[in-house]
Image (tube, grey):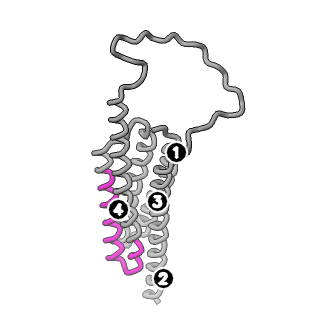
Amino acid sequence: MADAASSVRRRRLIWVLAAIGLVVVFGLAVFLTVLLVRPASPSTSAAPTPTPAAAPTPTPTPGTSGEPAPAASQAQQQQYRAYVSTLIQGGTSVLASMAGLADCRNGRPQCARSLNDASNQVSALQRDLAANPAPQCLAAADQRLQDSLTFQKNGLDTAQRGIRTQNRVQVAQGLLLTAAGLWRSTQAIADGRQANC
């Protein structure tokens, strides 16, 4: 009887972890998709916009124009490309490792390994993003993405400890931290969509 009850609890835990893994995978996929597909620049609204008072224009010094230097603009575009490329490559690895959480159906040891792999992939993405910082136009989205990754890493590590020690409270805490990371990633998506890079 005790074996049947523990088997049922184990199966429930495995299904809950698999569901969380799928939600994390879906959340990251949506984030990457939204970050890459930018909305068209906002159109002018039908309501009249008040005309701002004319501000005095500074007199440019010789050799400067009022526009940003092309080299600075190119540097920002290169930083943008490096950041987005890093996010896509690392995000794909995280998604693949999260899909590996389906192995939790195969038992506790395999589940712990899958959680460890997912946690390592999140850590690698954090390191790669630190090495390729976001351009200023994506600073707010990057901050929320970093928060999301931190919550997810903490959640995966806590769930892994809970699986190894058979501590249901730690597994629940891990799931809640992972959910908090997903919620934070939705905020990062909103900021990324509003960015003008």
Residue 116 lies in the magenta-colored region:
yes
Q: Are marks 2 and 3 in contact (CB under 8 Å)?
A: no
Q: Position of residue 184 (x, y in %)?
A: 48, 50
Residue of label 2: 8
Mark 1 or mark 4, which has the lower sequence index? 4
Residue of label 3: 29
**CA separation in Å, label 4 and label 2:** 32 Å
Q: Quadrant of the C terminus?
A: top left
Q: Position of residue 23 (x, y in %)?
A: 49, 64
Dominant secondary structure of the residues highlighted in magenta in the image: helix
Three-letter amino acid code at disc 4? Ser
- The residue under the point 46% across, 88% down is 4
Mark 4 or mark 2, which has the lower sequence index? 2
Mark 1 or mark 3, which has the lower sequence index? 3
Residue of label 1: 193
Residue of label 4: 93
- Using a 10 Å C-alpha cutoff, classify the residue at mark 4 as few (fewer than 14 neighbours), some (14 to 19) or many (20 or more): some
Residue 4 lies in the magenta-colored region:
no
